Image: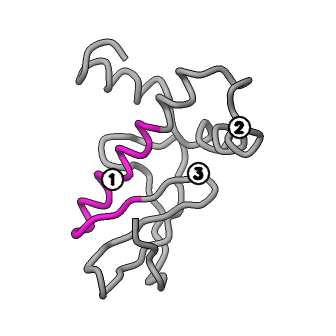
Amino acid sequence: MTPCTSVLTSEEMNNIGRYKLLKPVTFEVSYDMSDSLWCLKNYDLALDGYGSTYNEAIECLEEDIEGHVLFFTRYPDSRHTNDSLIVKKNLTEYIDFKQVLDYLRERDGEV
């Protein structure tokens, strides 16, 4: 993905698309004019959303959350790096993994 060069603002979110957060999280919001690309980033949670519209960037964040939750629930902690475990710990403070897994089961069947 193209890195966004300048932060326009920051935005505190209580939910990311369909996912209600356990507590608000702040994202850097930027727009890359050369690529016409919205970027939403939170480094501590390793979440990045990109899209040609703001809503597409939110949808990308939803997919990023789903990928992280699947990654952290399918593999035991012993298979993760120390940095990865820090991200997992940070994510569990903001994201209800059960909520995400329930949605994925409803959408896709067994996950």
Q: Name the magenta segment's main secondary structure.
A: helix
- Residue underneath mark 2: 85
Label 3–label 2 contact, CB within 8 A = no
How far apart, in angstroms, are the residues tagged by discs 1 and 3?
14 Å
How far apart, in angstroms, are the residues tagged by discs 3 and 2?
11 Å
Q: Looking at the picture, which amino acid does disc 2 mark?
A: Leu
Colour pattern: one colour
The disc, 1 or 3, on the residue closer to the chain's N-terminal end is 3
User: Image quarter for residue 109?
Assistant: top left
- Residue underneath mark 3: 45
User: Image quarter for residue 103?
Assistant: top left
Label 1–label 3 contact, CB within 8 A = no
Residue 22 in the image: x percent, y percent? Answer: 52, 40
54 part of magenta stretch: yes
Quadrant of the snapshot with the N terminus: bottom left
Secondary structure at numbered mark 1: helix
Residue 39 in the image: x percent, y percent? Answer: 39, 69
Say which residue appears at 65% left-offset and 20% top-offset.
76
Residue 26 in the image: x percent, y percent? Answer: 53, 63
User: Image quarter for residue 111?
Assistant: top left
The stretch in magenta equals: 49-67
Say which residue appears at 41% left-offset and 36% top-offset.
66
69 part of magenta stretch: no
**Mark 1, other Cα within 10 Å: few <14 / some 14–19 / many ≥20:** many
> Considering depth in this image, is 54 or 83 the residue closer to the camera?
83
Q: Which residue lies furthest to the right in this view?
A: 82
- Residue underneath mark 1: 60
Q: In this view, does 32 lie above or below 87?
A: below
